[in-house]
Image: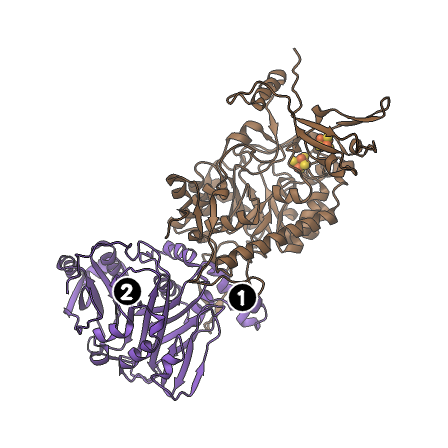
């Protein structure tokens, strides 16, 4: 379980360099709120095996911790027991830890060099929180950032309530089995990611999804606006330490939703805005709104190829860049809705679909739990 | 002792080609060419030649060229002939040396040491001939509050913005320093191209109020031609605090350039030198600037963006930060290479810093302070090509001002003699016979051509980077790499060296 420290490090670590990746992404949601194990999503992403190269895979599941749904679920990678000790000291000072344990995993030949993986359910110490003059979410994010930036060898890779990110270095289907997602967990929605980095960082924290509280993003593409987006979002106190597209996209969405209070539809009109020429032809009301959003947030327009699935409590959003330079297909059957880089990723788990479509560039597809659905 | 300064340039005539048509004589306002009746040949007094190339361009038989004079002092790396001549001139006259156009000296041009990225394999380039490629920009404050009506619809809370079809505008050049025809060409080209020209500090001629939608009017320390109608006509108002060619001093328009029309437009007497003071005498500090900004905003009902133009000087980042906090909507930074109609030579050649470094620092500082959204940034002085525009935007500029490049399009050959008022190209002159050489229709067309060509080139370079909107290029410094720059320069520019991966 201890990271193999005999290997010499020859390539730069994640965050020291910017690593472009090609990828596969996939997601499924049961809008009735009924929970399913991770078995389906593993099969879906496994079908697109060739879109990954074994250097990163991961999943996010929503509704998986119903018994602890009031608590933040922290998933942590540790390089060693020393970083674990330091982190736990920090956690104890800032949170009430309700339950903690080593993450249950399955030994697989193909998964090697895994770090120590721990899970904590916790909530902020009320006094500390009050003294910080921050709202609860900000407080939690600050603590996560602090651990990730300052404790060498520790990395919080999941921090939401009643959801969890599971990721690592390997093919996604192996990572899924390694975490026993097919047996131990069931959730109303799942997202998955298979990574094809053009470099071999081999760091578990660098795999995707990227999570921020209950937000998670899986992304396929390489955005050309990266540094414009990064430099802008960093002026609002975010720090892009991993230098990945996924990280900056997550921060951008978080900023627009949590700070600016935009709706998901509006977020899509900022990051994947219509062309001016298209906007001019739209009906008055839309033109008014979209012109305003483009004028107000020009630096959050994301260009270059991307397809993302944004996971949040109660739903999923799929979004392509405005030229649709990456494939992405959506499908529905009854309460179930699917999103995948390729149609095969959907057909393999549900051959009989009621509706299959490829969303146009810049057109968000949003699936949320139906009213009265068993959310948590 | 009478100073004799040898000619810098020699007018070379091929007598096999010369037909003695005397066109050159007619075209040279400096009186270089004349006809020697006795010998029946054209002669030239090279001493008067400023190398404006007018005669060369108009000579129907291509009999003329201007060559660097072979006459030289004993070579000396420390004492160049120019330096020596300047000493002779000052010893003779006791005066301050005057120059025009931008600093021509041997300083690094950082734009030429920056290289642009392109997409390969991992993400696709975008073909501007087949896909939309957006170069439209809005200039103004972006730090808006999100507000909704009762039904939850967004309310447009944007402060006033300038809407540019491409990130290039014509920079401030006053009527007086340049001609009526030059102004007309600029105004009309700005209208056609969907961008803006700038009146400079010389007021707005009655005839040009019809282009006011594409006009930025300037309020400078002399307040020439400033009145309420002038302010309300404009699309935006620029307060000129400084100019790259002459930071720290005011404007100087020689009396002979002050014609009837110029005097009326500027509201100053005819024929007398118009000197604007070095500071605005109502602005001795940053809080005074705030007052002027809000005075102008009040006077125009908060309906127009206010630009504050500053020269790129050593402390430019802190100054810009102060300006951004003073209510300005846009900051224009003018680099030390920026042009001028007249400036003391010593100031033009020795004061200020390169605009690339100033821009990089201002953009970074405003971001560090979290106020980059409070202002847009325009840079000029000097932006010479579409590649410079692309690099400036990637460093963090919202748009660029071009002055010299626009004058070149109108025929200017950079003889740097604008202060003499005898521009043979009809640009930097008020002499009617010279002004009419510049046809405003043709001038306008050439300016439109220039901007259209640049726009195509900008789109081409953006497409190569896989970027289809100029917004995604702004401040995108990963798209730049430096060559031949040292660590300090790279740090100031915020770019990596070529060959270095991210
Ligand atoms: S000043 Fe101009 S027009 Fe006159 S001789 Fe020289 S180049 Fe020719
Ligand atoms: S504007 Fe006229 S005088 Fe000035 S540099 Fe150009 S050609 Fe020479």
Q: What is the chain identity of the residue bearing mark 2?
A: A
Locate the N terminus of chain B by quadrant.
top right
User: Under tag 1, what secondary structure?
Assistant: loop
Q: Quadrant of residue B202?
A: top right
Whether label 1 lies within 8 Å of ligand 2 gets the answer no
User: Under tag 2, what secondary structure?
Assistant: helix
Of residue B392 and residue A222, the one placed in the foreground of this image is A222
Against A178, residue B346 (above or below) is above
Which color has been applied to chain B in this rendered view?
brown
Q: Could you say where residue B16 lies in the image, as x and y percent from the top left? A: 79, 31
> How is the model colour-coded?
by chain
Which color has been applied to chain A in this rendered view?
purple
| Mark sitting on residue B292 | none
Q: Could you say where residue A293 lies in the image, as x and y percent from the top left? A: 48, 64
Q: Marks 1 and 2: same chain?
A: yes
The reply to whether callout 1 and callout 2 are in contact (CB within 8 Å) is: no
**Residue visible at 43% across and 42% down?**
B317
Q: What is the chain identity of the residue bearing mark 1?
A: A
Viewer can see residue B157: no
Q: Check disc 2 and report the residue beneath it.
A: A137
Left or right? Give the position of A234 relative to B71.
left
Whether label 2 lies within 8 Å of ligand 2 gets the answer no
Other-residue count near label 2 (Cα within 10 Å), few / some / many at <14 / 14–19 / ≥20? some
Against A279, residue B431 (above or below) is above
Total numbered badges shown on the rendered structure: 2
Against A219, residue B165 (above or below) is above
Q: Could you say where residue B213 lies in the image, as x and y percent from the top left? A: 64, 54
Q: Check disc 1 and report the residue beneath it.
A: A275
Q: Quadrant of ligand 2?
A: top right
Of residue A109 and residue A45, the one placed in the foreground of this image is A109
Left or right? Give the position of A273 relative to A310.
right
């Amino acid at each position: 379980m201890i990271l193999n420290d005999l290997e010499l490090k020859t390539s730069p670590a994640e965050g020291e360099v910017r690593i472009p990746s090609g990828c596969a992404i996939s997601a499924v949601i049961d809008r009735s709120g009924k929970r399913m194990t991770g078995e389906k999503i593993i099969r879906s992403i496994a079908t697109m095996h060739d879109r990954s190269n074994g250097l990163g895979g991961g999943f996010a599941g929503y509704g998986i911790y119903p018994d602890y749904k009031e608590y933040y679920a922290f998933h942590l990678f540790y390089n060693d027991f020393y970083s674990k000790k330091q982190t736990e000291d920090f956690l104890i000072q800032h949170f009430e830890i309700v339950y903690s344990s080593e993450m249950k995993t399955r030994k697989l030949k193909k998964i090697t060099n895994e770090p120590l993986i721990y899970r904590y359910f916790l909530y902020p110490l009320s006094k500390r929180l009050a003294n910080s003059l921050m709202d609860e979410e900000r407080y939690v994010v600050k603590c996560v950032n602090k651990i990730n930036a300052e404790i060498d060898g520790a990395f919080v890779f999941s921090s939401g309530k009643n959801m969890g990110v599971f990721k690592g270095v390997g093919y996604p289907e192996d990572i899924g089995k390694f975490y026993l997602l097919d047996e131990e967990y069931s959730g109303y929605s799942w997202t998955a990611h298979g990574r094809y980095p053009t470099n071999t960082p081999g760091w578990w924290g660098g795999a995707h999804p990227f999570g921020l509280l209950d937000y998670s993003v899986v992304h396929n593409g390489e955005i050309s606006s990266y540094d414009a987006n990064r430099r802008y979002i960093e002026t609002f106190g975010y720090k892009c330490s991993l230098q990945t597209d996924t990280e900056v996209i997550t921060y951008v969405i978080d900023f627009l939703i949590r700070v600016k209070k935009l709706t998901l539809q509006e977020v899509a009109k900022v990051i994947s805005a219509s062309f001016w020429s298209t906007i001019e032809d739209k009906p008055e009301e839309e033109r008014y709104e979209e012109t305003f959003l483009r004028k107000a947030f020009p630096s959050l327009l994301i260009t270059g190829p991307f397809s993302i699935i944004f996971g949040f409590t109660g739903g999923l959003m799929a979004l392509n860049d405005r030229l649709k330079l990456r494939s992405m297909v959506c499908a529905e059957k009854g309460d179930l809705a699917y999103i995948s880089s390729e149609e095969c990723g959907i057909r393999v788990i549900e051959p009989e679909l009621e509706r299959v479509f490829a969303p146009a560039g810049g057109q968000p597809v949003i699936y949320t739990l139906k009213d009265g659905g068993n959310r948590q | 002792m009478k100073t004799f300064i040898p000619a810098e340039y020699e007018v070379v005539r091929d007598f096999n080609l010369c037909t003695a048509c005397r066109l050159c004589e007619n075209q040279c306002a400096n009186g270089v060419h004349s006809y020697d009746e006795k010998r029946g040949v054209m002669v030239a007094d090279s001493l008067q030649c400023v190398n404006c190339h007018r005669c060369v361009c108009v000579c129907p038989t291509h009999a003329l060229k201007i060559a660097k004079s072979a006459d030289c002092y004993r070579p000396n790396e420390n004492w160049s002939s120019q330096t020596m001549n300047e000493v002779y001139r000052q010893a003779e006259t006791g005066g301050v040396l005057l120059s025009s156009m931008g600093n021509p000296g041997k300083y690094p041009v950082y734009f030429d040491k920056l290289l642009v990225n392109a997409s390969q394999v991992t993400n696709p380039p975008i073909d501007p001939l087949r896909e939309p490629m957006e170069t439209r920009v809005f200039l103004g404050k972006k730090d808006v509050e999100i507000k909704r009506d009762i039904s939850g619809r967004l309310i447009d809370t944007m402060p006033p913005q300038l809407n540019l079809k491409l990130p290039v505008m014509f920079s401030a050049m006053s009527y007086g320093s340049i001609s009526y025809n030059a102004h007309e060409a600029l105004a009309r080209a700005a209208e056609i191209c969907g961008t803006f020209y700038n009146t400079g500090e010389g007021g707005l001629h009655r005839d040009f109020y019809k282009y006011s939608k594409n006009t930025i009017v300037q309020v400078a320390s002399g307040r020439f031609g400033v009145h309420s109608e002038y302010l309300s006509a404009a699309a935006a108002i620029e307060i000129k605090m400084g100019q790259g060619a002459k930071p720290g001093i005011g404007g100087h328009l020689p009396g002979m350039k002050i014609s009837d029309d110029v005097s009326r437009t500027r509201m100053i007497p005819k024929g007398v030198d118009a000197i604007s003071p070095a500071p605005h005498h109502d602005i001795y500090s940053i809080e005074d600037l705030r007052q002027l900004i809000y005075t102008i905003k009040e006077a125009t009902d908060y309906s127009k963006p206010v630009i504050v133009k500053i020269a790129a000087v050593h402390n430019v980042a802190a100054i810009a930060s102060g300006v951004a906090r003073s209510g300005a909507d846009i900051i224009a930074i003018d680099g030390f290479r920026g042009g001028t109609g007249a400036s003391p030579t010593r100031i033009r050649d020795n004061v200020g810093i390169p605009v690339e470094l100033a821009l990089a620092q201002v953009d970074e500082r405003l971001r560090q302070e979290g106020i980059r959204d409070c202002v847009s940034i325009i840079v000029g002085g000097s932006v010479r090509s579409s590649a410079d525009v692309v690099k400036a935007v990637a460093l963090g500029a919202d748009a660029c001002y071009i002055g010299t490049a626009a004058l070149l399009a109108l025929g200017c050959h950079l003889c740097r003699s604008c202060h003499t008022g005898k521009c043979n190209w009809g640009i930097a002159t008020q002499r009617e016979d010279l002004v009419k050489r510049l046809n405003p229709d043709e001038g306008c067309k050439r300016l439109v051509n220039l901007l259209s060509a640049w726009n195509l080139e900008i789109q081409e370079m953006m497409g190569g980077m896989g970027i289809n909107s100029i917004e995604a290029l702004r401040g995108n410094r990963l798209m730049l790499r430096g060559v031949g720059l040292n660590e300090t320069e790279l740090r100031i520019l915020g770019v990596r060296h070529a060959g270095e991966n991210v």
